[in-house]
Amino acid sequence: MEAGTGKETGEEALKAPAVKLSSLIASRSPMLAASFILAAIGTLIAPPVLFPITHNNTLTTDMSIFGCCVVCPIWILLTVLTLNRYGRRGLWVLLGLPFALCCPGIIVVLLFACATGHACI
């Protein structure tokens, strides 16, 4: 940068945004990692994943419902806190949305099927 003019050279202008971007990613990476970990756990407790392991419909359903009652509210809380803190810059947390809501979505479909008398497990 030229002294006192406030003008940056082309090389300095390219280096400055990279530093800012890396610091932004580093400051949010724990929340992003926590979001993906919770989303992965939410996916792993889904009935289609658990049933081949347990081979027991009742145990699979009980574990899935318990897991959804624990994991999904934590993920939602993390998402709300992140959006509250970062605003629009925190929308990246929503990348875990399909995975975090996989188990509750499947359970809602199964409960609807049981309520209507079709394919109840």
Image (tube, rainbow, N blue to C red):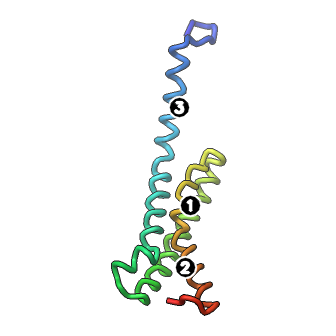
Q: Are marks 3 and 2 in contact (CB under 8 Å)?
A: no
Q: Residues within 10 Å of mark 3 (few under 14, many from 20)?
A: few
In the image: residue 17, left or right of residue 47:
right
- Which disc, if any, is residue 20? 3
- Seen from the viewer's position, the closer of residues 4 and 92 is 92
Measured along the vertical axis of the image, is residue 46 above or below residue 113? above
User: Image quadrant of residue 84?
Assistant: bottom right
Q: Residues within 10 Å of mark 2 (few under 14, many from 20)?
A: some
- Which disc, if any, is residue 53? none
Secondary structure type for disc 1:
helix
- Seen from the viewer's position, the closer of residues 76 and 114 is 114
Q: Position of residue 8 (x, y in %)?
A: 58, 13
- Which disc, if any, is residue 107? 2
Q: Nearer the viewer, mark 3 or mark 2?
A: 2
Residue that lies at the very extreme toward the bottom in this rendered image: 117
Mark 2 is on which residue type? Ile
Mark 3 is on which residue type? Lys
Mark 3 and mark 1 lie on one chain; the one further toward the N terminus is 3
Q: Position of residue 58 (x, y in %)?
A: 43, 90
Q: Nearer the viewer, mark 3 or mark 1?
A: 1
- Seen from the viewer's position, the closer of residues 21 and 2 is 21
Secondary structure type for disc 3:
helix
The residue under the point 46% across, 74% down is 46
- Seen from the viewer's position, the closer of residues 84 and 46 is 46
State the CA–CA distance, disc 3 to disc 2: 42 Å
Q: Position of residue 27 (x, y in %)?
A: 49, 43
